Amino acid sequence: MIDIRQLRENPERFRQGARDKGAEVQLDRLLALDEARRGILQKLETRRAEQNRLTKEIGPQIGKLKGQLKSADAGAKAGIERQLADLEAKPVALKNEVAALEEELRAIEPHWHELLMTVPQPPAHDVPRGADASGNVEIRRWHPAGFDPAKGFEASRGFRPRTHLELVKELGLADFERGVKMAGTRHYILTGMGMRLHQAVLRFAFDHMVEKHGFTAVGVPVIVKEECMVGTGFFPFGKEQAYHVEESRRGSGHDLYLTGTGEVGLMGIHADEVLPESALPLTYTTVSTCFRREAGAAGKDTAGLYRIHQFDKVEQVVVCRADDAESREWHRRMIGFVEEILQALGLPYRLLQCCTGDLGMKNEDMIDVECWMPGRGEAGPDGAPRGDWGETHSASRLGDFQCRRLNLRYKDAEGTIRHAFALNNTVIASPRVLIPLLEIHQNADGTVNVPEPLRPHLGGRSRIEPPARRA
């Protein structure tokens, strides 16, 4: 959620931010409602102050008049009673006025809040402008010795590569037909070494974050209340992507939603809390199952493990002080952790600076990490894919956007209460990462080499072979 005071002071910044992100926001309506709301609040404050003052002033007067009334003669009683009635009517009139103002506030606040929640976080000043992903800018790339994505797989390795679809079938790593039978399109079953490789990747990445970089391991719910989805900025912007569990229809007090990332649970831990500055930065990591409806992705990457409804992800979240330089440094470090992992796995990758139109509504900055996947891209003259980059990670800076929505604050050294800054980044997501892992490390005979860091989690195996050979 944006800072409403900043919107009042510089509405053009937020207008431009919405335009840059391609968002339609009723800012003029919001500002009009905000002005009306502030006027009501100011009147309420004034009337309540009058109530307090009047109570203090007329209390003794009423007591005095009531005392006089007891001893007054018939001629004086009528005058005293009129004075009492006048005094007693004043707080009643104020009470009625306060009640009317409170009713006005109740009528306006839901609309004000609804519009406020739709205003996107403006992009950072140094994010390049662009309408969509085509405007993203490559920062750098890395590839292991002996493999150059610019040359292609066959030129680098000397044989035509199999796609991950061919590899998982020949090696018995996944069963798409039975997955679809059980749960519909974009579902799958990991089998045998496929499941073990999936778990090995997750465990390697998780241990890397905990043991090498000191992140706190946390297990969080993956089914949460709507408030948690709103608080982390996934609603209202991406509500169509979430699976909805309508518990209220079954007598429960609230509906629930399946989360699409561990970020939701990790950020929700400290909602509505004020932390001491000494507790920051919070550095959390989790492994969680993630669920995404992939609404609007019909006909896109429908085959294989790339765009699926259920997957597992190691996520990293940092909550730090409200300091732009500190946030940027954490962003750099978090991307570095991912690069360490990808280099250890021997996966070619590139970093892309996302442009304004590809940031999403809640991010002020985002770097995407894409791995080279030989089985993607357009087919060449021989009918084989030429290979292409595919997104595997996103590293985001959110400023105080999430923390404002979650009411996550800290008390600084001067005793001032501030909203913290938040960042998140995928550590690894599987089974999508299995696509480059299998395709890059395949051999001409159809086997796949296991990168060194994964071998301890696979019983020391250095190669994945077809089931017949393993037997």
Image (tube, rainbow, N blue to C red):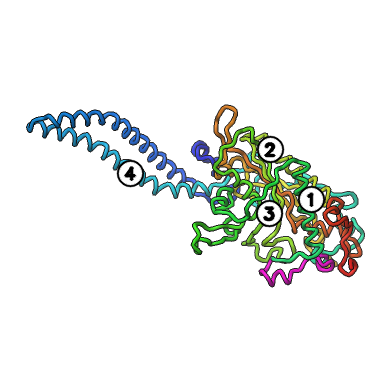
Q: Residues within 10 Å of mark 4 (few under 14, many from 20)?
A: few
Label 3: element kind: strand
Mark 4 or mark 1, earlier in chain: 4
Q: Which quarter of the picture shows residue 330? A: top right
Could you tell me residue 108's position as x and y percent?
41, 47
Q: Which residue is mark 2?
A: 328
Mark 3 or mark 2, earlier in chain: 3
Q: Going by the image, does 441 lie left or right of 337?
A: right
183 is higher (above) or lower (below) than 316? below
Q: Choose between 118 and 335: the one closer to the eye.
A: 335
Query: Is the Cβ of the residue at disc 1 closer than 8 Å to that at disc 3?
Result: no
Q: Which residue is mark 4?
A: 99
Label 2: element kind: helix
Q: Nearer the viewer, mark 1 or mark 2?
A: 1
Residue type at numbered disc 2: Arg
Q: Which quarter of the picture shows residue 171? A: bottom right
Q: In percent of the image, x 76 and y 68: which residue is there?
A: 175
* The magenta stretch spans residue 361: no
Q: Rounded to the nearest whole Å, what is the CA distance between mark 1 and mark 2?
A: 26 Å
Q: Which residue is mark 3?
A: 288
Residue type at numbered disc 1: Phe
Q: Which residue is mark 1?
A: 204
Q: Going by the image, does 409 lie left or right of 439?
A: left
